[in-house]
Image (spheres, rainbow, N blue to C red):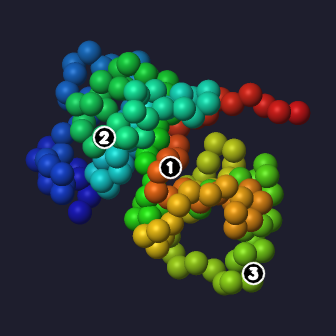
Amino acid sequence: MTPTQEGDRFPHGPYRPLTSHYAYLHESIIDMASVNQLEMYIGMGIALFPCSQHNKKPLTPHGFKDASLDRATITIWLAKYPDCAWGTPTSADHGVVDIDPRHGGVKAWEALIARHGDLPPHPITETGSKGYHHWLTFPPATKCSQSLIGPGIDVKAEGGYVIVPPSRIHEPHHV
């Protein structure tokens, strides 16, 4: 079911638009396309938390452990950090294979697929570095790793987080 109006039900409660919580939020302050994207994540049960757009570090005291599905909390964060990036915690049930082209991830991923075969259909999002997040379910004991299965391929599972679209990260460019 796609939420379209006030009163539609989600597993975690009724649908209420983010901007309905605080009248002071105005389209000139908050990009409404971003708000709509955040609404989609909340509707899918994907908890969010604000991160620095400069270094991806969480802006909340407890980092990804502060992630929330609560519209009032997210609306407060939107007002406090209007230009932030948005993160979501990862786990075995909500895992990501992060392909980073800057570190050879695309070539390594293509080699893995050629060797082991393609994966079943799954969501894929583009990252700020023009890489990809492959959203997958992992075995329960899966932990986060960096370049363990191939150069430029990170696994984000229990104890990690990723930045989600439409976030924009403004990292310094390396020559």
Q: Name the residue under label 1.
A: 160
Q: Which of marks 3 and 1 is nearer the N terminus?
A: 3
- Vertical side of 133 occupied by 51: above or below: above
Q: Image quadrant of residue 79?
A: top left
Q: Image quadrant of residue 149?
A: bottom right
Residue 71, given in percent of the width and then of the height, sits at: 25, 36
Q: Which of marks 3 and 2 is nearer the N terminus?
A: 2
Frontmost of labels 1 and 2 is 1
Residue located 77% across and 60% down the image? 151
Q: Residue furthest left?
A: 7
Residue located 65% across and 29% down the image? 170
Distance of label 3 from label 1 (alpha carbons): 28 Å
> Which amino acid, mark 3?
Ala
- Say whether marks 3 and 2 touch (CB < 8 Å): no
Residue located 49% across and 47% down the image? 161
Q: In this view, does 11 lie to the left or right of 140?
A: left
- Within 10 Å of disc 3 (Cα), the crowding (few <14, some 14-19, many 20+) is few
Q: Name the residue under label 3.
A: 114
Q: Mark 2 points at which residue?
A: 68
- Vertical side of 45 occupied by 122: above or below: below
Tell me the tag on residue 123.
none
Where, quadrant-wise, is the N terminus in this rendering? bottom left
Residue located 31% across and 32% down the image? 74
